[in-house]
Amino acid sequence: MKADLMSIGALTTCFHCALPAGKRPLRFQVAGALQPFCCQGCYLVHLVTGQQGERGESLVALARLIVGVTCGMVVMIFSWARYADEYVLGYVLGEPDALAVFSQYYVMLAATLVVAVLGIPILRDALRGLAALRTGVDPLIAVGAFSAYAASVVAFVRGGETYFDTATMILIFVTLGRFLEARGRASASEAIRALNGLVPDTARVLRAGGEAMVPATDVGIGERVLVRPGEMIPVDGVIHEGCGSVNEASLTGESRPVTREAGDRLLAGTLSLDGAFIVTVTAQPEDRAIARLARLAEEAKKQKPAWMGLADRVAAAFTPLVIVLAAGALVFWGTRLGFVQGLLIALSVLLIACPCTLGVATPLAFWTGLAVAARRGILVRSGVVLEQLAQVTDVFFDKTGTLTQGSFRLVEVLSGFDTHANGNGGDGRSPLQVAASLESRAEHPVAAALRNGAAASGLAELPVSAWRAEPGLGVRGSVAGSETEYVLGSRRLMEHVGFQLAPGLAEAAARRGESGETVVYLGSGGHVRTAFAVGEEVRGEAGTAVRALRRLATHVAILSGDERGSAERLGAALGIADVRWGLLPHEKVAAVQAARAGSASRKVAMVGDGINDAAALAAADVGIATGCGADVAREAADVAMIGGDLTQIPWLLGFSRRVRRTVATNLVWSFAYNTAGIGLALTGWLPPVLAAMAMVLSSLFVIGNTRRLSRHAVGA
């Protein structure tokens, strides 16, 4: 197809390899539209593979590497044969015969193909960088490889010593390094993008005409989808009907199945093990948790942490310095050992100084870190956030819905204070059974706690008549046809209807209230002889998470909008001394800002799940939304946890520190390698081919060191 060479007036990203394609990219028809490409090679590989981004870039590098290695083998076979004759066997060729002349032409042709396929892309990138006043690693590589090739061509024409093998091996090793780097980036992203493949292409939608199989992308919000046992869930939604076990390991990293029932949330890409569900869709395809995960990963790659900025600045200053050193080596050794030997030493300086490891050291570590966190169901917005997590000194928790389940449980039935034999009202019914029956129509969390408590005791709900609600106070009604009216609710409601508390009940209820529990009273006939203490359920893993944070030398605090007793009771249960209660949303923000302002070395992470936490999440150095969080909280957060497991937080802090240590190790290695290598090259102890090999071995060390991070995808 005809390429459109029209200038677009700005740097354009190649459709295939995602690298800058320059101001005048080649444009080809793809899916009915003109798309920019770096070169015909990118376009051809895209036609064959259909791959884009990091995957496509690695395939381009692999295709070039195959050509380079194939031709490079020809160059090396003939070159090493000549070296063996001259330097090992001591045999010096006389007048070359026809076969020898042919082999020399063959070597030059093979080397020219290597330079064209592997060298021109590097030269093009170097020229683009220089045109944009950017000095990176490409100029060093281009100068080294093309100098060796040009010197060999001149020597071949004059009948002198050629070094086509040096130019060839430089480009092969550099391309190998680029391929390994591209594969590393592709592996870091493939795990995230592959999650989209877990979502079925079709969904079984319940419509007026019955079941209909439609594309999952066409299912709208509010529609109902049927999921059968053993099927992958195609949508994000809330269970309308059904109960069963769901495997959410693909998103949360939790290998144990979880039970989901009516009212619970289901996420696309998870697996229904044994339950049939009717799910009400709550999110468009582009807003699904899996889609947000992939989108956050792509956004993360556009931001550079401070470590990466440091590496770029060092590389920019390093390039002109190395060129000056290489030029000095050429002049110094050229005047003493001859131009050719001086040129080889200068080439060695250029090659060993090539900061390829510096370019790989930081981005690969952060990309790998983001991918590992994503596999555990933790969406980190960028590498910058990952770097900030490594510096966190204070973790502030919201209380309700974060450290607690957001639900209540029945703690104790307070009764027996001057009661009749039947407990209440003289009709022989259990007070808990009466209370649960009265709450059968209520949706309040306390009502659910009473119903669950009765069910656990084997008490069935009784029919209720004359039921009416007292907004904000409680409920009234008669049970199972009895003429006795029961009143269930707060102390204020009891006072409002004129019921008197039995002796001792007020004191017991007051003690429960001071410990942070909610007390609900049940009365009839003008008397209150029973009360129910209801408390919030603390997350089972909260204590483990707090202890793990302390082992990381992190200060932990609770910021709660609840009353003092409830907040302090939770703090005592979890061993958290810094508990602040009665805080409005803006007061939580003030607490976070005060902690940050206390010292430049303090970095604060805020953990929350609700809309009222959004401002505090945004004010912190790092905002962490748990359990996917409310939409507003999720948008304000830097980290979104698909699962609600609080032990993921200390794991994330520890892992981010491990990523930072890996980056530091890689950079120290890179600087030490370059410094030692330049010294050896300047003294003439390091031939160009060995310099190129050493450069690749250094890159392999950095990549191998970084890949160790992948082992931490499972476990703390």
Image (cartoon, grey):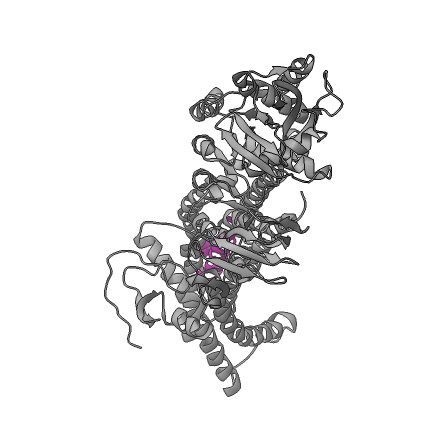
Q: Which of 630 and 659 is in front in this view?
A: 630
| Residue 422 drawn above or below residue 662 | above
Q: Which of 179 and 426 is in front in this view?
A: 426
Using residue 3 as the reference point, say whether residue 587 is left or right of it. right
Residue 352, horizontal then vertical, whole percent: 52, 53
Residue 278, horizontal then vertical, whole percent: 54, 57
Instruction: Please tell me in which quadrant of the rendered image residue 657 appears.
Output: top right
The residue at 32%/49% (across/down) is 133
Using residue 370 as the reference point, say whether residue 546 is left or right of it. right
Q: Magenta residues: mostly which secondary structure?
A: helix
Q: Is residue 147 visible?
A: no
Q: Which residue lies furthest to the bottom in this view?
A: 98
The residue at 58%/21% (across/down) is 579
Does the stretch in magenta take in 671? no
The residue at 45%/41% (across/down) is 310
Using residue 296 as the reference point, say whether residue 707 is left or right of it. right
Q: What stretch is highlighted in magenta?
A: 334-358
Instruction: Please tell me in which quadrant of the rendered image residue 112 appears.
Output: bottom left
Q: Which of 605 and 19 is in front in this view?
A: 605
Using residue 641 as the reference point, say whether residue 122 is left or right of it. left
Residue 64, horizontal then vertical, whole percent: 47, 70
